[in-house]
């Protein structure tokens, strides 16, 4: 298993995800979305796994201006704006190879063990 957890230090769900994997002795790599964001390929992989671009957006984000801008842009521009504003993504994003989840989803992570 090659687990990557994308989130921020202030996100409670990100902390819970890290605890989930620590308790099971599963090594993971933490990536701070505020500092590093996601690469183009990583974001494409996450959107593919989530099913749609809208499924990865966090409507409760503190970055409401960026969220509203992205929500109402045409589809071609949404992706690029998401790369520029990774804090509008639901957290945590947990990747395991080509698989990915958005938000706190321990029931899916258990299947990866």
Image (cartoon, helix red, strand yellow):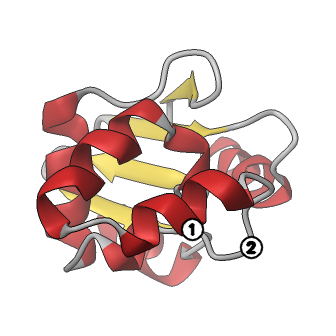
Percent x, y of residue 63:
72, 52
Percent x, y of residue 49:
19, 68
Task: State the quadrant of the C terminus.
Answer: bottom left
Give the answer, above or below, for where 32 lies relative to 53: above
Q: Dot 1 surroundings within 10 Å: few (below 14), some, or many (20 or more)?
A: few
Give the answer, above or below, for where 106 lies relative to 23: below
Percent x, y of residue 50:
27, 74
Percent x, y of residue 66:
58, 52
Name the residue located 35 percent from the left edge and 77 percent from the top edge. Answer: 54
Q: Secondary structure at mark 1?
A: helix
Give the answer, above or below, for where 39 lies relative to 90: above
Name the residue located 42 percent from the left edge and 31 percent from the top edge. Answer: 84
Please report contact status of discs 2 and 1: CB closer than 8 Å, yes or no. no
The quarter of the displayed image where residue 59 is located: bottom right
- Res 90 visible: no
Q: Judge left or right: residue 79 versus residue 10.
A: left
Please state which of residues 2 and 72 is positioned toward the viewer in this rendering: 72
Q: Secondary structure at mark 2?
A: loop
- Res 59 visible: yes
| First reached walking from the N terminus: tag 2 or tag 1 | 2
The quarter of the displayed image where residue 42 is located: top left
Q: Judge left or right: residue 37 versus residue 66.
A: left
Please state which of residues 111 and 64 is positioned toward the viewer in this rendering: 64
Q: Judge left or right: residue 60 versus residue 93.
A: right
Residue identified by numbered label 2: 60
Task: State the quadrant of the N terminus.
Answer: top left
Name the residue located 74 percent from the left edge and 73 percent from the top edge. Answer: 60
Name the residue located 28 percent from the left edge and 48 percent from the top edge. Answer: 96
Q: Nearer the viewer, mark 2 or mark 1?
A: 1
Q: Dot 2 surroundings within 10 Å: few (below 14), some, or many (20 or more)?
A: few
Residue identified by numbered label 1: 68
Q: CA distance from mark 2 to mark 1?
A: 11 Å
């Amino acid at each position: 298993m090659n687990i990557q957890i994308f989130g921020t230090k202030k996100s409670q769900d990100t902390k819970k995800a890290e605890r989930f994997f620590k308790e099971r002795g599963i090594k993971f790599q933490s990536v701070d979305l505020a500092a590093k964001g996601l690469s183009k390929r990583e974001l494409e992989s996450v959107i593919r796994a989530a099913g749609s671009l809208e499924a990865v957006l966090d409507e409760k984000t503190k970055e409401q201006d960026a969220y509203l801008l992205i929500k109402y842009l045409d589809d071609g521009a949404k992706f690029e704006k998401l790369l520029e504003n990774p804090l509008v993504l639901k957290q945590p994003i947990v990747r395991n190879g080509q698989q990915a989840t958005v938000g706190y989803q321990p029931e899916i992570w258990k299947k990866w063990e």
